[in-house]
């Protein structure tokens, strides 16, 4: 762990336990994963993913390039809006799932999975084809702070004159303003928690000031610094896949339950379109599902999912759902058994087993009411 985010000394002061994340000393937990998880669900959780590198796609042909690179329809994306999409290979496998911010008519910012930045850059560059666009890696020029939870608007509105109401800044939109006297702060209604939340991107030289100010203003509201452990557990309750565990270059958006992100009616093509189109029209042979387990045993990646003594799938990741008070897992099962309330068994490498119930939607706020509030 040779690199440190701008907030590192603040994390040390708050008692963070660190892990190596792409060479960065990243906070895994401060107090406990459960406390941080519940703070995010009930009040405010503050997350830093400084190693989340942005990629800019800019130029007269930037939209056309991204139309050929992403499964979503970027031509329909207005300025100051955000879309969740994927870059795929020729077999329809996901090179990465990412968010795309339209900053101007001719400028976009992509935020890929930190470990997939180079792959995402190359996937976009492959679609340049002599057109007028550039694809710079933005590196670590800007600091990042994710403010997530039902009281996040109350907290941030006390620090900015920018209107943060849903009417002014709906889910998956962005604006720019001054927050805690920090100019040129991009305020985005996005996040990975499944709650009302905002992501702030701003000049790194203000990192200490903004973090300290947000923490101080958030303390009376129950705000807590949160680590990667809580980030992974809150996303599990929402059935949000994690790249490298639940999705990768061997899984298509249709198999991952992300068919809603795929636009087949746009004029531009993209790699893997024929495979993805066939799966969307005819169905895939497997499906990513959420599993609510009985008991307190947590399965491991690779454990078998069994029905009537037949292996019909595999666990990809598992976490405790601290708000719903259940052990949860994600895994791929054969589509024929991917039915809500289907009972299965999990055969663990240790030799033990437990029962589980398949859920085709999130166990927490399945309609997405909280993120849109």
Image (spheres, grey):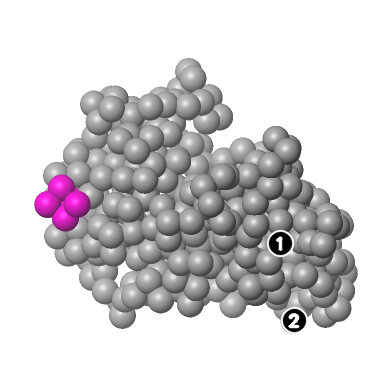
In the depicted structure, whether residue 2 falls above or below residue 123: above
Where residue 334 appears, as percent x and y from the top left, is 81, 64
Q: Earlier in the sequence, mark 1 or mark 2?
A: 2
**For mark 1, does the 10 Å Cα neighbourhood hold few (<14), some (14 to 19), or many (20 or more) residues?**
many
Of residue 114 and residue 371, the one placed in the foreground of this image is 371
Where residue 328 appears, as percent x and y from the top left, is 55, 54
Residue drawn 48% across and 77% down? 367
Mark identifier at residue 322: none
**Does 336 sit left or right of 120 as displayed?**
right
Which secondary structure lies at badge 2? loop
**Does 316 sit left or right of 218 as displayed?**
right
User: Which residue in the protein does label 2 denote?
Assistant: 265
In space, the residues marked 1 and 2 are separated at their CA atoms by 37 Å
User: Which residue in the protein does label 1 denote?
Assistant: 344
**Any part of residue 256 in sight:** no
Q: Which residues are magenta?
A: 218-222
Of residue 73 and residue 231, the one placed in the foreground of this image is 231
């Amino acid at each position: 762990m040779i690199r440190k985010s701008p907030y590192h000394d603040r994390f040390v002061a708050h008692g963070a336990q660190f892990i190596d994340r792409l060479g960065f000393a990243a906070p895994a937990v401060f107090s406990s994963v459960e406390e941080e998880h519940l703070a995010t669900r009930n009040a405010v959780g503050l997350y830093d993913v400084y190693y989340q590198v942005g990629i800019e796609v800019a130029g007269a042909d930037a939209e056309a390039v991204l139309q050929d690179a992403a499964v979503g329809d970027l031509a329909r994306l207005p300025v100051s809006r955000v879309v969740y999409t994927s870059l795929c290979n020729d077999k329809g496998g996901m090179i990465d799932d990412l968010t795309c911010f339209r900053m101007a008519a001719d400028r976009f910012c992509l935020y890929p999975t930190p470990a997939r930045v180079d792959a995402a850059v190359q996937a976009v560059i492959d679609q340049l084809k002599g057109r007028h666009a550039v694809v710079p890696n933005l590196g670590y020029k800007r600091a990042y702070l994710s403010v997530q939870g039902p009281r996040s608007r109350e907290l941030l509105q006390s620090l900015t004159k920018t209107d943060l109401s849903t009417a002014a800044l709906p889910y998956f939109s962005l604006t720019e303003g001054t927050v805690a006297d920090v100019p040129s702060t991009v305020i985005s209604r996005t996040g990975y928690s499944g709650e009302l939340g905002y992501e702030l991107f701003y000049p790194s030289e203000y990192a200490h000031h903004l973090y300290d100010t947000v923490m101080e203003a958030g303390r009376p509201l129950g705000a807590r610094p949160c680590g990667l452990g809580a980030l992974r557990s809150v996303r599990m309750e929402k059935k949000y896949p994690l790249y490298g565990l639940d999705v990768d270059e061997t899984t298509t958006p249709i198999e991952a339950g992300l068919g809603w992100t795929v636009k087949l009616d746009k004029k531009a093509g993209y790699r893997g379109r024929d495979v993805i189109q066939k799966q969307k029209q005819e169905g895939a042979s497997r499906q990513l599902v959420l599993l609510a387990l009985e008991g307190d045993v947590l399965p491991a990646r690779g454990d078998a999912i069994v029905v009537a003594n037949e292996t019909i799938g595999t666990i990809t990741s598992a976490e405790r759902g601290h708000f719903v008070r259940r052990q949860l897992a994600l895994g791929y099962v054969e589509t024929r058994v991917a039915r809500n309330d289907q009972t299965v068994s999990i055969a663990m490498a240790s030799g033990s087993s437990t029962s589980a119930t398949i859920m085709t939607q999130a166990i927490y706020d399945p309609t997405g009411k909280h993120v849109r509030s």
